[in-house]
Structure formats: structure tokens, C-alpha cells
Amino acid sequence: MRKTVFVFLVFAIACSPPVKKKKADNKLKGDWAFLDKRGNYNEAFFGDSTFFTYNKINGKMPEFKYKVINDSLYSDFEKSKKALNRIAGIKWISENRAILSTEFVHDTLEPISGPGFLLSNTDFKKDSAKFVKDHYQRYETFLIERGILTAEEVREFKEKGKVPEDLIKQDQ
């Protein structure tokens, strides 16, 4: 009887499908928006293994390889070095908000959702003008939702070129 049970267990284990190791979930994957330390609106796209950003001043930056290991972001910014180097710490402050921190900056990334041309779905050779138009709309929405500007201030600037008074530098 024991021999039969043992043979059955060996047969059952041998016929069982292999257990696949679950790959670590990359929570950074996707389109993100943030204000940099100078207050410039930026969008970033993190794919499976590469990322890049866009802002109105610098345009689209080249793609860089990256990897998330524990609470750090590693990248190949220095192309001369073969290995990925730690470039920032990652602190998740909610399920969909993360702070990327270096010695000099602390950028709070928030996911971008909705239709339109995003970094993840835009071919810049064909659709850059459409992307830029959608980018500026997301920029306005971003500033309004955070109370940095009001919808009225945005409208007045577009229609009359009027800069909000709190953005005008006062000489003292």
C-alpha cells in the first residue's frame, strides 16, 4: 500500500504543471506627469525596460534603459558605463503617486490618464504636432487641478495675454 501511494505521489508531482515564478510588478510602467524643481511641467513614459521624458523647453529626451530594484531607479545615463547605475530613490506615497528623489531633486510623479496622444502612443516622426497640442491641454488641466492657476486665469491669458498678478514679479 505504501509503495502504491508513493508511486502515485511521484506520478502526480511529475504530471503537475511547473510553478511559474511571478515577475516583480513594475509599478512605474506607464505615462506620468510632474513639475520639476524649476516648475516646468514634464511628462515621462516608463516602458518595460526604457524610459524618456518630454517638456516644452527641452522637447523629447532620448530613451534610456532602466530597472527598478526595491526602492531605487537604476539607469544607463552614462552610456560609457556598461552597468545600470542608481539614479534615484523611489518612495510611493499612494498607489498612484511616487516621489523620485536624488540629492538635488524630489519630483512627485502622478499618472496621466485619458485619451489623446501620450508619450506611450505617439510616433514623434508623424504625430508630434498632435502630441504637443494634447500635452499643452494636459499641462493646463494639471495646473488647474492643483490650484496653481484657475480656469479663468487660463482663459484670460489665452484670449488677452493677461498674466495672473500673482505670477508677476513685484519689484520691492
Image: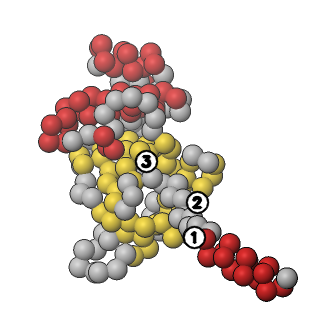
Amino acid type at circle 2 is Lys
In this view, the residue in front, 104 or 22, is 22
Q: Which residue is mark 1?
A: 18
The answer to whether residue 70 is above or below residue 36 is: below
Q: Is residue 111 left or right of residue 83?
A: right
**Residue 91: assigned label:** 2
**What x and y, as percent, mark residue 21?**
57, 69
What residue lies at 50% left-to-right and 62% top-to-bottom? 101
| Residue sticking out furthest to the bottom | 3
Q: Are marks 1 and 3 in contact (CB under 8 Å)?
A: no
| Residue sticking out furthest to the left | 125
Q: Quadrant of the C terminus?
A: top left
Judged from the image, the secondary structure of the residue bearing numbered disc 1 is loop
Question: Of the residues under marks 2 and 1, which one precedes in the sequence?
Answer: 1
Amino acid type at circle 3 is Gly
Question: Of the residues under marks 2 and 3, which one precedes in the sequence?
Answer: 3
Q: Residues within 10 Å of mark 2 (few under 14, many from 20)?
A: some
